[in-house]
Image (spheres, rainbow, N blue to C red):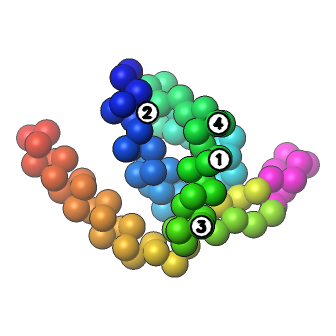
Amino acid sequence: MDKSLLSGSNTMLLLQLLKDQDMYGYQMIEELRKRSQDVFEMKVGTLYPLLHSLEKSGFLQSYEGEAAGKKRIYYQLERKKGEWAEYAGAVMHVMQLQLD
């Protein structure tokens, strides 16, 4: 898939993943790949700068946790959750209109 199509979508995809549950980096990569039926394969070098930027902007908060006996940094959708929900709803509405 043309990478230029993905560049503006990465933020939306990550925030949508974190809407329902907190996740750590590798978990996000795997879940995105699974939900997209192997279309989206985000690289670590793309993921972490984006996560750090979203955290700095106040969209995400990170905390340390454990998974399978290993320490992980989890990310959760933070205080701008309402703003994200409104934006995502509007995008989905536009996309639905275009897809029908």
Q: Which residues are magenta?
A: 65-72
> What residue is disc 3 on?
56
Residue 50 seen in the figure: yes
> What residue is disc 1 on?
48
* Mark 1 vs mark 4, CA separation in Å: 6 Å
Q: Amino acid at mark 2?
A: Ser
Name the residue located 60 percent from the left edge and 65 percent from the top edge: 55
Question: In what quadrant of the picture does the N terminus appear?
Answer: top left
Q: Amino acid at mark 3?
A: Lys
Q: Nearer the viewer, mark 4 or mark 2?
A: 4
Q: Amino acid at mark 4?
A: Gly
Name the residue located 36 percent from the left edge and 31 percent from the top edge: 4
Q: Is residue 100 left or right of residue 12?
A: left
Vertical comparison of 75 with 70: above or below: below
* First of labels 1, 3 by sequence position: 1
> What residue is disc 2 on?
36
Image coordinates of residue 25 in percent, x first then y, are 67, 46
Q: Could you classify mark 1 by the number of other residues whose Cα lies within 10 Å: few (under 14), some (14-19), or many (20 or more)?
A: few
Q: Main secondary structure of the magenta part?
A: strand
Give yes or no for residue 95 being in the magenta stretch: no
* First of labels 3, 2 by sequence position: 2
Q: Is residue 16 left or right of residue 73?
A: left
> What residue is disc 4 on?
45
Q: Is residue 19 left or right of residue 8?
A: right
Q: Quadrant of residue 29?
A: top right
Give yes or no for contact between labels 1 and 4 (Cβ–Cβ under 8 Å). Answer: yes
